[in-house]
C-alpha cells in the first residue's frame, strides 16, 4: 500500500471522530509517537494484517467505533512512520540519533546504516557523509560489531575527512581498530597501527622501562597504547612462527606488515614481561621475510637476530641455536667462509652452546673464529697496541666502577662538523665535539663518518646526537633525569672522555630494530667502535640500561680484540683488563671456556680485595 493511500485512509477514520474523540485520539497518538514500545505493543510489525483487522472493525456497532478508529489512527501512523524512516534520510538519521542517545545502539545502527545509504544516494558531500559515518561506526563499536565498525572507521580515515580530524580523534579510532582486529584474531593491521604509535613515541622508546612510572608527555602516552595491546598479541600469535599464516596481502603488503611486526616485537623484547608477545611478532615477521625474500636477505637475517635472543629468554634454546646457525650460514654464503664479520654470529652461537653445557663445541667454534682472524690480520695483529700513547687514555674504562675525575677534559676535542659528520644539533653545541683520538692510522671523526656512511639505508638517516659532555653538563642532565636510569651519574659517563657517540636514526635514538643497528653490530668494530651498553649490562642505575645507540671508540685493533676474545657483553671489564687480554692474545693463550676467563678472574679478585 502506498504512503498516500495510507494517509488518506487515516484521514477518513479521523473524520468520524467528534471533538472529544479527536482529543483522546491525539493524546494516544502522542504517547505512541514518543514510545516505541507502546507502538509495537499495539500494532506490532504486521501492517497488512492490521488493515484486515480494520475492515472487520468497520462492521462493529457504533459504541465500538471510537476504539476502532483509534486503532486505525495508530496503524496509519505506524505505516507512515515506517515509510518515512525508510525513504527519508533525515528522518532515518533523526531516529538513529534518538535511539543512540537513549543507549539503544543495537537498534540505532539499523537506522544509521539506512540513513547513510540514503544520504549517499542524495549526493551528500563526502566530508559531511563521513562525519555521519564515524558516528555510526562508533555505534557499531559500542554494539560489539567489529567488522562493520572497522570498515566504517577505515573508510572515514582514508577519505578526505581523515586529514581534517583532530589528532586525538584519529589516534582513538586507530586504537579501536587495533582492539577490534586483535579481538577477532587478526594481528596484521594492529601491528601496523602499533608501529605508527612507536614512531610517534620517538625517544620515549629509549626509556621503555620507566614510562609507566611517570606522568610523561605525548611519547609515553603512545607507548601506553602499544603496551595495552601486548596481552592480545600474546594471545593471538604463537611463538613458533605459525602466526605468519594469519597475514594476507600482496608481496609488498606482506613485507610492510613484517616490518611493522619487527618494530613492535623489538619494542616488546625490551620489556621483562614482553618476551612471548615479542616471540609471536618476530617469529611471524621472520617467516614472512624468509618466504618473500629468502634466508640470505639482510632483513631476514635481522629478524632472526632479534628473535633468537628472545627464544633464549623463554628457554627455547634449540630454536635459538637453529636461527643462529641459519644466520651464520647465510652470512657465510654472502661474505665468504673466512670473513671476520662472521665473528658476531659465532659469538652468539657459542653463547647458546655454553647455556646448553656444550663447552667442547663452544671452544671449537672459538678456535675457528681465531683462525679466521689470524688468516685475515696475521699472527701479530695486536702488536701495535704495545706502543700506544696512553696519555690520551683512549682505552680507559668508564663506569660506576671506573669513575673519571670531575676536572677531566680531553686534550684533543674537535668539532664533528669540521670532519663532515652529519649532526642532529647545531655545530656550536658542546655535544657536537668529539676527540680526535688518532690511533691505528685513523681518527675518531674520520672513522665515525665512514661508519655512518657504510650503515646508511633507505629511509634511515643517521646523525650524531651527542658526543662530548663536560662534567658540568652531566650534573645538569642527571638533575633533570633524576633516577630514570637514562643518564649516567656524573663522572661515570664515557661522554666525558669525548669517545662516545650517540647515534640518531631519523632524529630519534637508534633502536635495535633499525637496519642501521644491524649494520653497526656487524661492522662497527672494523671502524674501531664497540657497543658500550649491551643487553643485560648493569652499568647504569635504571631498570634496563641497554642502549643500542651508544657506541664507544677504542680504535680498530682494540675493537678487533674485543670481538675475537673479549668477554661478550662486558666492554668495561674488557677495557679494564685490556693489557691482560693483549698479552694472552700475543702469546697465543686465548680464553679457554672450559677453564674460564683468567683476565676477568683477576679483575674479580681485585674487586674483592678492595
Image (cartoon, rainbow, N blue to C red):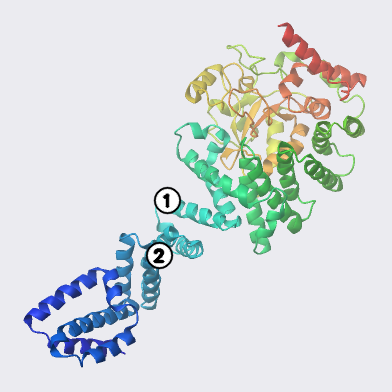
Q: Is residue 3 above or below residue 214?
A: below
Q: Secondary structure at mark 1?
A: helix
Q: In the rendering, at what x and y percent does residue 469 appear?
A: 57, 22
Q: Residue 167, labelled with which disc? A: 1
Q: Is residue 155 left or right of residue 522?
A: left
Mark 2 crowd level (few <14, some 14–19, many ≥20, 10 Å Cα): some
Say if mark 1 contacts mark 2, CB within 8 Å: no
User: What is the CA distance from the residue labelled 1 to the residue labelled 2?
Assistant: 28 Å
Residue 556 seen by the camera: yes
Looking at the rendered structure, the number of numbered marks drawn on it comes to 2
Mark 1 or mark 2, which is nearer to you? Answer: 2
Q: Is residue 565 above or below residue 76?
A: above
Give the quarter of the figure containing the N terminus: bottom left
Q: SS for tag 2? A: helix
From the top left corner, tell me how far across and down residue 407 is, in percent: 58, 11
In the image: residue 204, left or right of residue 47: right
Residue 413 to residue 149: above or below: above
Q: Is residue 579 visible?
A: no
Looking at the picture, how far across and down is residue 102, in whole percent? 31, 60
Within the image, what quadrant is residue 94 found in? bottom left
Q: Residue at the bottom extreme?
A: 59
Along the viewing direction, whichever of 290 and 237 lies nearer the viewer:
237
Q: Between residue 506 and residue 319, name the one nearer to us.
A: 319
Task: Determine crowd level at label 1: few under 14, some 14-19, many 20+ residues with C-alpha closer than 10 A.
Answer: few
Sequence-first disc among 1 and 2: 2
Residue nearer the viewer, 47 or 502: 47
In the rendering, at what x and y percent does residue 45 appear?
A: 34, 79
Q: Is residue 534 left or right of residue 271?
A: right
Q: Is residue 56 left or right of residue 599?
A: left
Which residue is label 2 attached to? 106
- Residue furthest toward the top? 609
Residue shown at 55% from the left, 33% from the top: 207
Amino acid at each position: 500500500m502506498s504512503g498516500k493511500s495510507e494517509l488518506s485512509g487515516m484521514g477518513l477514520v479521523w473524520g468520524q471522530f467528534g471533538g472529544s474523540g479527536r482529543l483522546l485520539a491525539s493524546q494516544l497518538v502522542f504517547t505512541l509517537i514518543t514510545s516505541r514500545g507502546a507502538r509495537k505493543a499495539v500494532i506490532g510489525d504486521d501492517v497488512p494484517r492490521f488493515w484486515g483487522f480494520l475492515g472487520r472493525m468497520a462492521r462493529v456497532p457504533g459504541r465500538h467505533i471510537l476504539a476502532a478508529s483509534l486503532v486505525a489512527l495508530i496503524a496509519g501512523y505506524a505505516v507512515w512512520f515506517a515509510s518515512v524512516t525508510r525513504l527519508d534520510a533525515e528522518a532515518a538519521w533523526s531516529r538513529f540519533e534518538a535511539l543512540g542517545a537513549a543507549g539503544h545502539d543495537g537498534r540505532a545502527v539499523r537506522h544509521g546504516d539506512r540513513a547513510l545509504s540514503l544520504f549517499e544516494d542524495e549526493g551528500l558531500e563526502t566530508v559531511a557523509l563521513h562525519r555521519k559515518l564515524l558516528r555510526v561506526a562508533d555505534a557499531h563499536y559500542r554494539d560489539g560489531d567489529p567488522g562493520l565498525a572497522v570498515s566504517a572507521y577505515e573508510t572515514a580515515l582514508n577519505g578526505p575527512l581523515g586529514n581534517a580530524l583532530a589528532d586525538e580523534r584519529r589516534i582513538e579510532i586507530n586504537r579501536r581498530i587495533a582492539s577490534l582486529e586483535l579481538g577477532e584474531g587478526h594481528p596484521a593491521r594492529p601491528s601496523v597501527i602499533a608501529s605508527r604509535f612507536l614512531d610517534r613515541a620517538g625517544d620515549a622508546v629509549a626509556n621503555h622501562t620507566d614510562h609507566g612510572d611517570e606522568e610523561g608527555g605525548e611519547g609515553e602516552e603512545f607507548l601506553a597504547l602499544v603496551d595495552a595491546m601486548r596481552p592480545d598479541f600474546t594471545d593471538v600469535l604463537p611463538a613458533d612462527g605459525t602466526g605468519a599464516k594469519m597475514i594476507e596481502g600482496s608481496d609488498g603488503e606482506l613485507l610492510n606488515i613484517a616490518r611493522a611486526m619487527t618494530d613492535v616485537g623489538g619494542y616488546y623484547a625490551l620489556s621483562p614481561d614482553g618476551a612471548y608477545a615479542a616471540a609471536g611478532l618476530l617469529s611471524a615477521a621472520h617467516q614472512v621475510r624468509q618466504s618473500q625474500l629468502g634466508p640470505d636477505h639482510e632483513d631476514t637475517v635481522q629478524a632472526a637476530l632479534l628473535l633468537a635472543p628472545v627464544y633464549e629468554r623463554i628457554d627455547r634454546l634449540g630454536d635459538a641455536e637453529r636461527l643462529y646457525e641459519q644466520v651464520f650460514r647465510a652470512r657465510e654464503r654472502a661474505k665468504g667462509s673466512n670473513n671476520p664479520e662472521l665473528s658476531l654470529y659465532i659469538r652468539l652461537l657459542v653463547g647458546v652452546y655454553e647455556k646448553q653445557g656444550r663447552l667442547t663445541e663452544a671452544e671449537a667454534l672459538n678456535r675457528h673464529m681465531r683462525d679466521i682472524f689470524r688468516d685475515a690480520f696475521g699472527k701479530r695483529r695486536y702488536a701495535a697496541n704495545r706502543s700506544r700513547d696512553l696519555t690520551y687514555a683512549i682505552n680507559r674504562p668508564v663506569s660506576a666502577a671506573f669513575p673519571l675525575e670531575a676536572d677531566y677534559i680531553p686534550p684533543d676535542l674537535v668539532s664533528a662538523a669540521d670532519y663532515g659528520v652529519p649532526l642532529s644539533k647545531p655545530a656550536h653545541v658542546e655535544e657536537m665535539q668529539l676527540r680526535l683520538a688518532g690511533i691505528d692510522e685513523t681518527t675518531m671523526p674520520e672513522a665515525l663518518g665512514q661508519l655512518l656512511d657504510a650503515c646508511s639505508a633507505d629511509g634511515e638517516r643517521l646523525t650524531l646526537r651527542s658526543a662530548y659532555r663536560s662534567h658540568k653538563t652531566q650534573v645538569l642532565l642527571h638533575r633533570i633525569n633524576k633516577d630514570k636510569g637514562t643518564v649516567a651519574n656524573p663522572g661515570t659517563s664515557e661522554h666525558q672522555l669525548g669517545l662516545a657517540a650517540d647515534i640518531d636514526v631519523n632524529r630519534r635514538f637508534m633502536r635495535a630494530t633499525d637496519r642501521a643497528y644491524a649494520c653497526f653490530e656487524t661492522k662497527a668494530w672494523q671502524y674501531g667502535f664497540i657497543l658500550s651498553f649491551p643487553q643485560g649490562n648493569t652499568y647504569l642505575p635504571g631498570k634496563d640500561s641497554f642502549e643500542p645507540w651508544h657506541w664507544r671508540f677504542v680504535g680498530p685493533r682494540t675493537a678487533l680484540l674485543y670481538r675475537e676474545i673479549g668477554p661478550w657483553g662486558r666492554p668495561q671489564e674488557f677495557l679494564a683488563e685490556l693489557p691482560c687480554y693483549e698479552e694472552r692474545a700475543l702469546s697465543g693463550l686465548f680464553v679457554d671456556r672450559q677453564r674460564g676467563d683468567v683476565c676477568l678472574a683477576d679483575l674479580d679478585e681485585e674487586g674483592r680485595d678492595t
